[in-house]
Image (cartoon, rainbow, N blue to C red):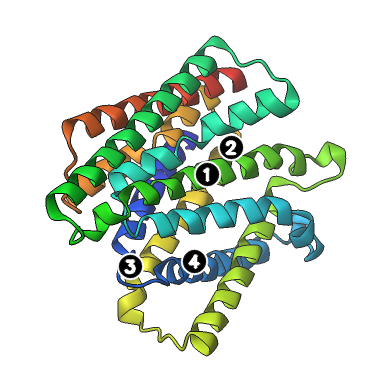
Amino acid sequence: MWFVFALLCTFFWGLADLFYKKGSDAKDTNTHLRIAIAVGFVMGIHGFIYWALNPDIGFTPLHIFTYLPVSFFYIVSMIAGYFGLRYLELSISSPIQNSSGAAVAIMCILFLGDRPGVLSAISIVILCVGVFALSVLEKRDETKARKLAGQTVDKKYQFGFIAIIFPLIYCVLDAMGTFLDDIFLDEANGFLTEDQGLLAYEFTFLIVAIVCFVYMVFVKHEQFFIKREKTRYAAAISETAGQFFYVFIIGGNGVITAPIVSSYCVVSLLLSRILLKEKLSIPKYIAIAVIVCGIVLMGVAEGLAEG
């Protein structure tokens, strides 16, 4: 079943990216907070259900504070990703965000003195080249659009190059969270189990959602209508479903599951092309293909290391 769960995890995370993009509105300066509220509430509900069904995992509210450094990086990275999607195609954002595995490897080299294997080293180089090329191409398109249209440029091109910074921020912060996960999810050192870490993360996201909701309603005087928020809650449900299946494949066959899950951006790319009708230039597709190859190779290297 772990193979089926790996496919389901990949599908739901790719689907979540699609709904994140559909739920992003360039005209709404608070759209990233609206998405964060939806994700936080859904994760909180899932956390309470999971805790009720598994009372023997030994979770206490104190674990929220213990795991807070990890939750902080994960949550801030996700909100940064939501912000960038306001002005950036999903076809560009998703592959860059999925490159966080390379950032983790670099952090392990710098701070832990790890020596990556040949496959890992090659994948890091491929990912860096692909992301750099995509950034250059996005800047080129922005400059070209400004020259052709002066100041009346489509918002996508006004902020395209700046917006690409946000998936890069996601990549780095998510990598930092993953890096700290190896430290905090270590029972041998007196820290948390994976279940305790999951609940701590989901309840922290719930707290963030409540704070954002209070801010939006009582400070910004924003209104919430179910019809307008349904796409964002579809994203939240898909994200949480992917996380649910991911928990079950952690102990599976890493040689196969790691590259499958790490390449969920391929699902995002297909859905964005089919359902969002996103069209990019051929050079951008080539750069994205390079990034995807690097992600898959990184997943293979990780799987072989676990195997």
Earlier-in-chain disc, 4 versus 3: 4
Q: Within 10 Å of the Cα at label 1, are there few (<14), some (14-19), or many (20+) other Cα atoms?
A: many
Q: According to the image, label 4 marks what residue?
A: 36
At a point 53% along the width and 71% down the height, the residue shown is: 41
In this orientation, which residue lies closer to the viewer: 262 or 73? 73
Gap between marks 1 and 3 measured at Cα: 23 Å
In this orientation, which residue lies closer to the viewer: 212 or 139? 139
What amino acid type is highlighted by mark number 1? Tyr
Helix, strand or loop under label 4: helix
What amino acid type is highlighted by mark number 4? Ala
Earlier-in-chain disc, 1 versus 4: 4
Q: Within 10 Å of the Cα at label 2, are there few (<14), some (14-19), or many (20+) other Cα atoms?
A: some
Please identify, in this view, whether the residue under mark 3 or under mark 2 is nearer the observer: 3
Q: Is residue 245 left or right of residue 60?
A: left
At a point 37% along the width and 64% down the height, the residue shown is: 234
Q: According to the image, label 1 marks what residue?
A: 246
Q: Is residue 133 left or right of residue 42?
A: left
Q: Is the C terminus in the top left, top right, bottom left or bottom right quadrant?
A: top right
* Quadrant housing residue 20: bottom left
Q: According to the image, label 2 marks what residue?
A: 250
Please identify, in this view, whether the residue under mark 1 or under mark 4 is nearer the observer: 4
Q: According to the image, label 3 marks what residue?
A: 231
Is there CB contact under 8 Å for labels 1 and 2?
A: yes
Helix, strand or loop under label 1: helix
Gap between marks 1 and 4 measured at Cα: 20 Å
The picture places residue 276, in percent across and down from the top left corner, at 20, 53
What amino acid type is highlighted by mark number 2? Ile
Asked if residue 300 shows in the view, the reply is: no
